[in-house]
Amino acid sequence: MTKKEQHPGGVKLTAKTARTLAMQEFGTARGLTKSTSFVGAYFMEFGNLRIEICADAACIAVRVVLAHGTGSSVKYFDPDTLQENFKAIDKHREDEDRAIISDWVNLNGPEYCRKQVEAIWKQGG
């Protein structure tokens, strides 16, 4: 991404880019609307799915969320090429994993967690 000016989220997401990405990923941009509360964010819905296309740091994030909040998926795209940014996807997964481990340690305490990790390590898996 070329540095032109600062934008919310780090990336300027236009309606044209959001439409192009929606067509690329979902085959349609029907119902794509600009958010009234978030700058540079666009939304559309398919039945029970809510699709969010928004700026995220140095990428464009596409999130698909189940309407009842029972699951979601996210992909990150390079803002210049609109190709998947696998480094950003890996970083997102690492951050999620770290948060899960942190919650586990905070809930159970470090000694218990250390013993559990040692037991798993000794079992080889």
Image: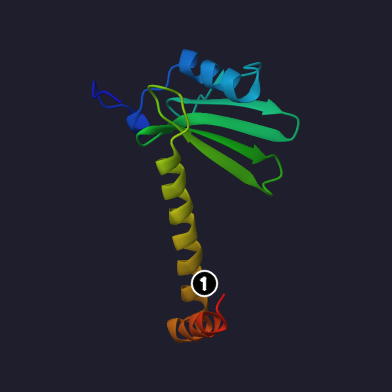
Circle 1 packing at 10 Å, graded few (<14), some (14-19), many (20+), is few
Q: Amino acid at mark 1?
A: Trp
Residue where numbered disc 1 is placed: 104
Query: How far across and down, in percent of the image, does residue 27 sit?
Result: 65, 19
Assign the N terminus to one quadrant of the image. top left
Query: How far across and down, in percent of the image, does residue 118 sit?
Result: 49, 84
Vertical order, 76 against 96 (above or below): above
Report the residue at 35% width, 30% height from top: 8
Q: How many marks?
A: 1
Report the residue at 57% width, 83% height from top: 123
Query: How far across and down, in percent of the image, does residue 102 sit?
Result: 45, 68
Query: How far across and down, in percent of the image, does residue 78 sit?
Result: 41, 29
Question: Can you name the residue that lies furthest to the top here?
Answer: 16
Vertical order, 93 against 8 (above or below): below
On screen, residue 65 versus residue 124, left or right, reads: right
Report the residue at 44% width, 81% height from top: 110
SS for callout 1: helix
From the viewer's side, name the closer residue of 58 and 7: 58
From the viewer's side, name the closer residue of 3 and 42: 3
Question: Can you name the residue that lies furthest to the right here?
Answer: 47
